[in-house]
Amino acid sequence: MTGVVILGIETSCDETGIGIVVGEELRANALASSVDEQARFGGVVPEIASRAHLEAMVPTIERACAEAGVALTDVDAIAVTSGPGLVGSLLVGVSTAKALGAALARPVYGVNHLAAHVVVDELEHGPLPESVIGLLVSGGHTSLIAVGPEGMEALGQTLDDAAGEAFDKVARLLDLPFPGGPAIDECAREGNPEAIAFPRALGGDTLDFSFSGLKTAVLRWLTAQHGEVRRADVAASFQEAVADVLSARALEACRCTGVDHLVVGGGVAANSRLRALVTERADRAGVQVRIPRPGLCTDNGAMVAALGARLVRTGRAPSPSDFPATSSMAVGEIAR
Amino acid sequence: MVERILAVETSSAWTSLAVADDGVVIAEAEHHDARGHVEAIGALFADTIAPALTGPPVTGVVCGVGPGPYSGLRVGIAYARAVALAWQVPVVGVCSLDAVAAANRQPGDYVVAADARRREVYWAVFDPTGARIDGPYVGNATEIPTGLPVVGVPAHARDLITFLATRSASDPARWDPTPIGVELDDHGDGGARTARALTGRTLLTAQPLYLRSADVTVSPRASHPVTAGVTWT
Ligand SMILES: [Zn+2]
């Protein structure tokens, strides 16, 4: 095997992901999801997710190894999401990583899920510059972070709902299926984004986000309607408001830090309007936007392996044997 | 060949690991902190178990499968499954109450009980040979049959070794576990008293004994009332 072999384990929400990176090349990105079991609840039930992770773990590791043509004994280091995320889910991944590290006598890196969402783009578009801004938007998080050579820094985050959650909740109001992101994106294609002027929330120079007001505005607007409503217009107008706020804040983060590379990650990065608006505004601001392909944007094991590979490459010490799984891993830490 | 077994127990607040050669414990390590299973298991292995694993290779892994609080239980079972995968050895489960019963035999029938939170207990009834004759159940402590002695100590990894010793090393079915099939027996009170699948000295697959369903506290989504008067076009 030429190149260091890193196995990455991701279990922060409802996707069990195992990625294998050899050198700088992605060899496998196996995934098992409990999203179908969650759909009837309209959101992620932590206990269902935790049970599904445990059942999926060994088969997903085996699938990833087969896909990569790698035996577990070929693995040089293991990386695992240590946080942030659902604790019950994280525990399954962290325990598995520690067990593999112990049984194979290999180092284990407990890593920050948010940093992994940014660094994963190295697998798609090559090495990242020393400093990048990450806009991370999914059902679990809405964060603006700065990743630099020494560590990472939180620049802004949601004060209430995650962006993906807002999509789920509004999809529910519109009688669209869960998960809401793809359903609203699809529905909005036929709609007029200027049909309804939904609020943009949070004025001033903050880089934080708030989506609960927007959700309430959609609810109020719908409550006032009688008879026929063009669902596509509501979806498009809501989506426009979200994409507007996210892209404006992301470019503002680039401007005030002087960083000219922006990585967009998380499931909501697949949203077509967000991609278009971020790209358009970044072009105007002279910022280079990098958006990994959808399979690397949503939670997956490859992103964890990619960050692990970077930590090994830069000579970082492995995590201590007693590192925890934590729901609110300090955003300043890239690894334990 | 030495039969070298790694035992992992996390069904209580304890995190407990042991290694045994032909049924004799050669190393064990324990930590007591309900919230710290995943922290403890890594440190216990690194500090105490790994140094003892010179010489013959581990030939099998056994883990306690509860009943017990699910998050901690999953830490131990995920750990046991992953080391077994890496070492390419079999992994089996033991009902943790059976392990406690094997290590704490009584002259007559007896009950083994463990904290199930939500003011409930996990319990099962055993005969003097240590064979489970009723349960496991989860429910109110008042449901435990009166007049039987109750053993209420947590399970330790070495108890799993003791349990395994009750099955002959030459038994070809020794590493051939029974898949767990718990019958969720919901008495209409939210699944509080659920029971019963397996009696006797049965080795199980390395799967948690979930005696409560995963969604007891959530209800399926209902359609939203605000849009009741709206027709989508
Ligand atoms: Zn994520």
Image (cartoon, coloured by chain):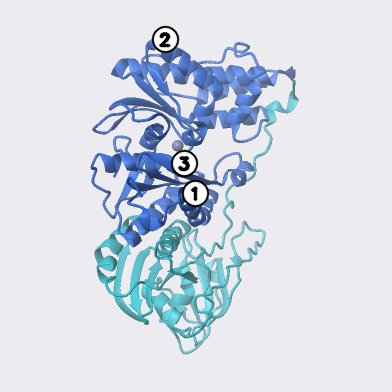
Chain colours: A blue, B cyan
* Residue closest to the eye, B189 or A111: A111
Q: Nearer the viewer, mark 3 or mark 1?
A: 1
Q: Position of residue B90 (x, y in %)?
A: 46, 70
Q: Which quadrant of the figure has residue A104?
A: bottom left
Image point (27%, 61%), residue name: B46
Q: Secondary structure under badge 3?
A: loop
Q: Position of residue B79 (x, y in %)?
A: 41, 60
Marked residue chain, label 1: A
Q: Which mark is residue A196?
A: none
In the displayed structure, A112 sits above or below B50; it is above
Marked residue chain, label 3: A
- Which residue, given by chain and number where applicable, does mark 2 sit on? A284
Kind of residue indicated by mark 2: Arg
Name the N-terminal-most of marks 1 and 2.
Answer: 1
Measure the alpha-carbon separation of dots 3 and 1: 15 Å
Q: Secondary structure under badge 1?
A: helix
- Confirm if mark 1 falls within 8 A of ligand 1: no
In the displayed structure, B3 sits above or below A256; it is below
